[in-house]
Image: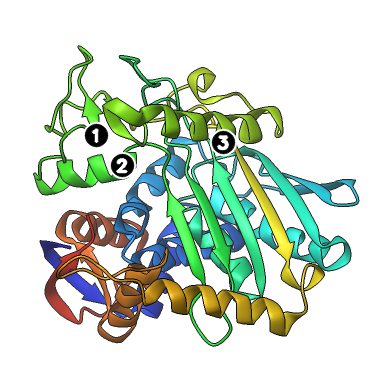
């Protein structure tokens, strides 16, 4: 956790505020609600790199025309267990939640559903959508491609997107197991957050324009794949999987052929692909047995001996601790983001949410 200058706001008020700002930029009520939901959810779980701080980015995209404010989602059942969602260049959060809804409907019939999404835009944290499935008792895998920012193993320039992967498992009587990770060393938005906060990068996570390692977030020209200089072939291999499922299976371009959509002057659509797989756990094992096996796993994992001062945790455990704190005490919003949001509120004639406190800590 990193100390920062900013505010805390009640989560429900923050979500309402974000939805109003997005609608102020002409987003449809449905698109705005889905996006505000995802951004607030990410911030509640301390995934701040993909949370509320991205709102100004989406507002700029809507105003520049690179994100369609009122898309018409189109869905098609391609096979008994396969459906396709055309996002119509709208906010990717809206299309992604819809893909999960459709996937759950199909999985109730067939046990498993695959739902690719095409012609989409950045959808924030992939874990928001697999979590939505887990909340309904389903397990899910989700991923998305993006324009190039990650070097291939032993490469010196960007080729892959950060190509994140998420996986969720429902836990009876507890919070879901929730994996949400980039296939790069760190997510791009963590670099942007470090630029905003003036904090150096960890070693061996980024290279500069000359292909040399750098800890300066302002000099970072490409990220390293997961595994770093020595074992980056592992992250690069996962990035290949994501690019295939999100390009060949969706009809979209792979990351290296996607036009860059960073910068305020960009007006062309992103045309990203997402890919979701949804499992009805009851199709595999009786509900009571499935729940018991998951609980056995978590109990055994949490009882494993740990290094001094540490504890063994399951994917999602740190985020659920943050979720409890932030649900009770408010969602932190860094000062730069807060200033941008309140400026947009003045522009659109909206009322900012109530501030609980003027300083906190934010995940980095």
As drawn, is 276 to the left or to the right of 311?
right
Above or below residue 249? Residue 348 is below
Query: Alpha carbon of mark 1 to alpha carbon of mark 2: how far?
Result: 7 Å
The reply to whether dot 1 and dot 3 touch (C-beta < 8 Å) is no
Residue 83: x %, y % from top left? 80, 48
Residue 352: x %, y % from top left? 29, 71
The quadrant of the rendering that contains the C terminus is bottom left
The residue under the point 30% across, 14% down is 156
Asked whether the viewer can see residue 69, the reply is no
Residue 94: x %, y % from top left? 60, 55
Q: Mark 1: give few (<14), some (14-19) or many (20+) Cα within 10 Å.
A: many
The reply to whether dot 1 and dot 2 touch (C-beta < 8 Å) is yes
The image's mark for residue 186 is 2
Q: Secondary structure at mark 1?
A: loop
Above or below residue 193? Residue 31 is below
Q: Mark 3: give few (<14), some (14-19) or many (20+) Cα within 10 Å.
A: many
The image's mark for residue 205 is 1
Residue placed under numbered mark 3 in the picture = 242
Residue located farthest toward the top when viewing the structure as drawn: 210
Q: Mark 2: give few (<14), some (14-19) or many (20+) Cα within 10 Å.
A: many
Residue located farthest toward the front when viewing the structure as drawn: 305
As drawn, is 300 to the left or to the right of 29?
left
């Amino acid at each position: 956790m990193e100390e920062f200058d900013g505010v805390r706001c009640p989560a429900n008020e923050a979500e309402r505020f974000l939805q109003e700002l997005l609608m102020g930029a002409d987003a449809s009520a449905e698109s705005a609600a889905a996006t505000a939901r995802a951004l607030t959810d990410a911030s509640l779980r301390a995934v701040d790199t993909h949370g509320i701080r991205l709102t100004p980015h989406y507002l700029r995209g809507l105003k520049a025309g690179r994100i369609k404010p009122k898309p018409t989602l189109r869905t098609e059942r391609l096979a008994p267990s396969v459906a396709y969602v055309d996002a119509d260049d709208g906010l990717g959060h809206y299309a992604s939640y819809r893909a999960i809804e459709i996937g759950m409907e199909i999985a109730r019939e067939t046990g498993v559903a695959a739902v690719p999404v095409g012609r989409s835009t950045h959808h924030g944290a992939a874990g928001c959508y697999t979590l939505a499935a887990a909340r309904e008792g389903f397990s899910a895998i989700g991923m998305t491609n993006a324009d190039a920012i990650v070097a291939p193993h032993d490469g010196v320039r960007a080729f892959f997107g950060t190509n994140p992967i998420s996986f969720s498992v429902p836990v009876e009587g507890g919070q879901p197991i929730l994996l949400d990770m980039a296939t790069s060393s760190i997510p791009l938005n963590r670099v942007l957050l470090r630029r905003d906060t003036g904090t150096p990068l960890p070693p061996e996570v980024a290279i500069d324009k000359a292909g040399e390692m750098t800890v300066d977030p302002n000099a970072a020209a490409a990220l390293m794949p997961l595994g770093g200089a020595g074992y980056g072939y592992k992250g690069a291999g996962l990035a290949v999987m994501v690019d295939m499922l999100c390009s060949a299976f969706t009809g979209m371009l792979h990351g290296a052929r996607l036009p860059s959509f960073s910068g305020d002057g960009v007006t062309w659509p992103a045309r990203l692909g997402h890919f979701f797989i949804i499992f009805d756990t009851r199709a595999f094992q009786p509900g009571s047995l499935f729940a018991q096996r998951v609980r056995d796993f978590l109990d055994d994992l949490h009882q494993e001996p740990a290094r001094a001062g540490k504890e063994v945790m399951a994917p999602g455990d740190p985020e659920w601790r943050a979720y409890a704190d932030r649900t009770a005490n408010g969602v932190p919003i860094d000062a730069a983001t807060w200033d941008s949001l309140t400026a947009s509120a003045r522009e659109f004639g909206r009322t900012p949410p109530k501030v609980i406190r003027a300083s906190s800590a934010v995940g980095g």
